[in-house]
Image: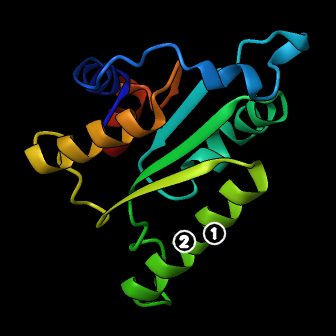
Amino acid sequence: MFHYSDILMAMRQATVRSEDPGLASQPTGPRGSTTVQRVLAVAAHPDDLEQLCGGTLARYARDGHVVTMCTVALGDRGSYVESRDSTAARRSMESRSAAARLGAELIQLDVPDGEIDDHDPALVKRMVDAVRTANPDVVITHNRACFRSAIT
């Protein structure tokens, strides 16, 4: 799974954005400031962001910031009743719905559950592309130590 240090490396690989003159026409930030931040939240599974930081993302969006949610895995092993394809389709729809309710953009990398390999060059490129697309000022993601200890 990608973690904070991996996201920082991806951010270093992404091009540095120049000041965007269009930001002045966007909503104001918290407490009336004119600084609008771009927030990227990255999580392994489709419902992780909603459960772990949904309130934080809602507040960023409510305060006029640009929020992007990125899920890496499909969430296709999240049911013993539905098929993997059906589960993945349902969870993708739920993620799209949650992002829409928050007013956030959604990037789904669609890696099958259990197959995330942060050393896979193709997946790393897709993550770098996601970072470039979101062009974040703020990144929210799993803590490496906490997440790894939960799955090992």
Q: Residue 90's image quarter?
A: bottom right
Residue 120 visible here: no
Residue 24 vertical position relative to residue 134 in the rendered view, above or below: above
Residue closer to the observer: 38 or 22: 22
Residue occupying the point 58% across, 29% down: 39
Tag 1: residue type?
Glu
**Residue sitting at the far front:** 21
The residue under label 2 is which amino acid type? Arg
Q: Which residue is mark 2?
A: 91
Element type where label 1 sits in the image: helix
> Callout 2: 10 Å neighbours few (<14), some, many (20+)?
some
Q: CA distance from mark 2 to mark 1?
A: 5 Å
Which is more toward the observer, 53 or 21? 21
Mark number for residue 94?
1
Q: Position of residue 73 (x, y in %)?
A: 37, 59
Image position of 91 (left or right of 113): right
Q: Residue at x 77, y 39 (%)?
A: 58
